[in-house]
Image (cartoon, rainbow, N blue to C red):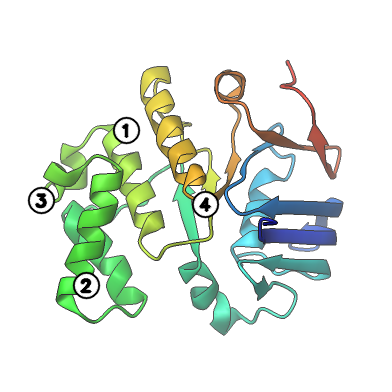
Amino acid sequence: MEQKTVIELIDVQVFQGKNLILSDVDINIKQGEFVYLIGQTGSGKSSLLKTLYGEVPLIKGQGTIAEVNLKELKATQVPFLRRKLGIVFQDFQLLTDRTVYKNLEFVLDATGWKNESDKKKRIDEVLELVNLSTKDFKMPHELSGGEQQRVVIARALLNHPEIILADEPTGNLDPKVSDDIMNLLIHISKTGTAILMATHDYRIIQKFPGKILRCENGIVGEVASVPTF
């Protein structure tokens, strides 16, 4: 059975304000694929991710993600889109004034979950998946950087996303912790959730091979091997 396409961009132009950042972008990512997005700082990686999660409007070209048409996406529909995606940031963006459990519950409340037992069941499921079942009562500052990133991944998984967009998820972590996070993300991709991960860390790409897209000179292209700089 052919895998479902979860991201498709055709002849897309990516703008930041009035500045053209990337042109003629053609991307096709299927269910369960693990794809790296590489490129030097300022090459357009973050702008491309922002286009995919609706922060930057798609003005030219055609694009769909998780069956949402990005060209027709209105500002009021962005929250609906983000319920279908998981987003993992380098700087965690956890709510520092509440526990791990309350951080996750906040997302479920914001995305329309009402039943308390359903919420608890889902929170327990994602914490078990990221191996943090015993840390639900902890505050973010009581966790290591690796544990905080695991909470962020758990948060991204709450609404059963078809794809996770990860922007430098290992950028602030040491190599061993980075490897742990990578093993977790790869496990998630094998369960059917596609992952598009922006990274500067070529050590990781060599250790955990995947499809590689590179932003360079205003275009995005697939490359066969890890580039060296």
Q: Give the side of residue 128 with respect to residue 17, left or right.
A: left
Q: Residue at x 61, y 19 (%)?
A: 206
Amino acid type of the residue tagged 3 in the rendering: Phe
Seen as rendered, the residue at the extreme front is: 1
**Coordinates of residue 124 in the picture (x, y in percent):** 20, 56
Mark 2 and mark 1 in contact? Answer it, CB < 8 Å: no
- Can residue 97 be seen at all in this image of the molecule? no
Query: Helix or strand or loop: what does disc 4 sit on?
Result: loop
Mark 2 or 1 closer to N-term? 2
Q: Which residue is drawn at 32% across and 67% down?
A: 107
Mark 4 and mark 2 in contact? Answer it, CB < 8 Å: no
Amino acid type of the residue tagged 2 in the rendering: Asp
Q: Which is closer to the viewer, label 4 or label 2?
A: 4
Would you name the residue on which mark 4 appears?
192
Amino acid type of the residue tagged 1 in the rendering: Gly
Mark 3 or 4 closer to N-term? 3
**Residue situated in front as seen by the camera: 110 or 117:** 117
Would you name the residue on which mark 2 appears?
118
Amino acid type of the residue tagged 4 in the rendering: Gly
What is the quadrant of residue 43 in the picture?
top right
**Coordinates of residue 81 in the picture (x, y in percent):** 55, 72
**Residue situated in front as seen by the camera: 84 or 199:** 84
Would you name the residue on which mark 1 appears?
146
Q: Give the side of residue 138 with respect to residue 68, left or right.
A: left
Quadrant in which the N terminus is drawn: bottom right
Q: Residue at x 48, y 31 (%)?
A: 171
